[in-house]
Image: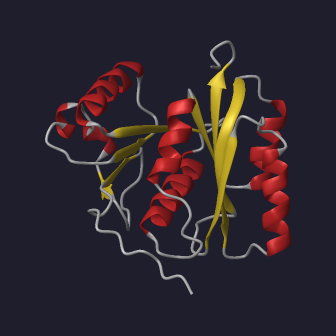
Amino acid sequence: MFEPIESEIDELQLAISLPELDSVVNGTLLPFDALTASSLSDSIFDALFVSGTFAEQSKELSQVCVDKRIELVVLENPTNDLTVIHDVVINLVDKLFSDEMPNNIDLADLRLLNQYSDHLLAFNNKCAAINYMSTQKLGVVMGGVYLAHGQTDLDEYENTNQDLIHHIPETGFLCSSYHSLGRSECTILIGIKRLGETQ
């Protein structure tokens, strides 16, 4: 049997700053109302998960994150549902800190999706994600991340993977895994590149 390799790398340093989010189990919660470029000036985070920032704030955060080599992960939801965004961010961060098998998703997967996409859309149920992918005109789906939760059986897991892959071009990718303690039905993050800007 293969044993999981013990990582000698320092533990992930992940920051979360979302409107109306009061606490997190994993990662560091940064109060959304106090989130500024200067508040990150002394940080050593690997990634910052945010949503709901305004244009000037996003520009400032983007620059400081580039300077500090922090992956800025900005999540959206088609209906601006904060509960969905909370669920997806917390589930993704909890999975990154978890040793639960399969332990096959890490920050590099989210970074790749983020860097190839102009928009990251969060969903906490399959139907909403598939319906959006079927009708969206925002751009080209570059890939996604799917976490099945505790109540999901193997058939449902495989069917959801196939339904998602159906809307992702051959040049895209889908990272799938399992998170038994996930909040809501499932976790789906879709990356979209605006039309006319595909590489």
The image position of residue 99, as x and y in percent, is 47, 75
Q: Residue at x 26, y 62 (%)?
A: 10
Q: Looking at the rendering, which quadrant does residue 60 occupy?
A: top left
Q: Is residue 105 left or right of residue 15?
A: right
Q: Quadrant of the C terminus?
A: top right
Q: Looking at the rendering, which quadrant does residue 43 occupy?
A: top left
Q: Quadrant of the N terminus?
A: bottom right
Nearer to the camera, 173 or 123: 173
Q: Residue at x 77, y 29 (%)?
A: 136
The image position of residue 189, as x and y in percent, is 62, 46
Q: Is residue 106 above or below residue 191?
A: below
Q: Is residue 67 above or below residue 17?
A: above
Question: Which residue extends farthest front?
Answer: 1
Question: Which residue extends farthest top?
Answer: 196
The image position of residue 105, as x and y in percent, is 54, 59
The image position of residue 125, as x and y in percent, is 72, 55
Q: Is residue 133 left or right of residue 54?
A: right
Q: Looking at the rendering, which quadrant does residue 59 occupy?
A: top left
